Amino acid sequence: MFMKQIRALSIAGLLMVLLSGTASAYAGQGESVRLLDGSEPLRTVVSKSETVEELLQAEGIEIGEFDVVSPTLDTEITKNMRINIARAFAVYVSVDGQEPVEVMTTSMQIYQFSAAYGRSISRVFLHNMDVWLDVVEPDMLIELTSKPATLVEERSMIPFAVERVETSDLLAGTEEVAVEGRTGVRLKTYEMQHTGFLETVRVLVSEVVETAPVAKVIMVGTGEPEPEPEPEFDAEPVFEYTSVLTMNATAYTLSYSCTGKRPGDRYFGICASGMTAQYGVVAVDPKVIPLHTKLYIEGYGFAIAGDTGGAIKGNKIDLFFDPTEDLRAFGRQTLQVYILADQDMDLGIDLYKAVEY
């Protein structure tokens, strides 16, 4: 009984070892791949390689620089995959009657070679139907004729630059266009080349500027305004007068502190006579000097009595100055005031001009 048990155990163990070995051998076989290497017969290999490149290395198959492997070397191995290796060989090519050059190719027929070689050198060749379907063989001389390319011209605009140049000849805050800008024109010439039956590419063959752009030049003012010169009078003007008065003189402007009015107020800048307040129009006491009387005032010049004032009584006179004048510098002065003999004298004063402030 004991011997039978040992024998039974031995047979069971042997079967398990055999089955285990068979399973391991089956699992380790790898994937079945069909391999076609150039003109060699199609053969099947079993490989554990993960990629096409690893399989070829494991099989000791070398790939030349111009050989073509399909699918690519980084493709993962799958069951029943087929790998094709197209071996490159040398042919001699003459283009447009030139000296033949050696070219490596894997093309099977002339039309395939013509299209592939044309793409590589950006040419398209005329179809020679006599040899169009001929098989390409090693060391063959292949004569190709280029198809004339179509030239296409394309024009585009070149924008002009804008230059800003500072000048003291213009007042600050002002600008002036010295040169008007002009857009330029660029001409590009392309060759329209066919690189396949339907595929077309454009190859740039030349690029020129037909018309150069002209920059726009803007002068930007930086100058300061020149102060307006005060009216110039002769140091000793020649005039005739009927009388001379010694008067206490003060000065006023259109400021609120002098007139009690602001720009926009009614009668702002208008004197009692209706004249416009300006240099040469002075305020007087009409009882002493009647309005519209033409005068010559020492240190001030020719003037006309055109305004009055509540504080201007007796031998007092108020002289108008531009708003920029410093009235404190004038203060109060005693001046000689001459009553002109020629009351029709042209003083050169626009008595009723628009008020400026």
Image (cartoon, rainbow, N blue to C red):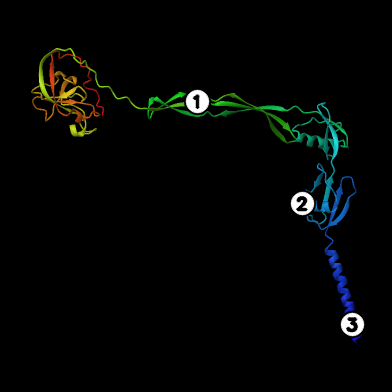
Find residue 154 and report its horizontal and vertical position in percent: 63, 28
- Tag 2 residue: 75
Asked if residue 289 shows in the view, the reply is: no
The reply, left or right, for residue 165 in relation to residue 111 is left
Q: Amino acid at mark 2?
A: Thr
Question: Does residue 271 sit above or below 27 in this rendering?
Answer: above
- Point out the frontmost of discs 3 and 1: 3
Find residue 282 and report its horizontal and vertical position in percent: 16, 24
The reply, left or right, for residue 295 in relation to residue 80 is left
Q: Is label 1 in a helix, a strand or a loop? A: loop
Q: Is label 2 in a helix, a strand or a loop? A: loop
Number of the label disc, if any, that sits on residue 6: 3
- Tag 1 residue: 181
Q: Amino acid at mark 1?
A: Gly
The picture quadrant where one finds residue 19 is bottom right
- Marked residue nearer the N-terminal end (3 or 1): 3
Mark 1, other Cα within 10 Å: few <14 / some 14–19 / many ≥20: some
Q: Is label 3 in a helix, a strand or a loop? A: helix
The mark total stands at 3
The picture quadrant where one finds residue 221 is top left
The picture quadrant where one finds residue 124 is top right
Q: Which quadrant: the C terminus?
A: top left
Q: Amino acid at mark 3?
A: Ile
- Point out the frontmost of discs 2 and 3: 3
The reply, left or right, for residue 68 in relation to residue 329 is right
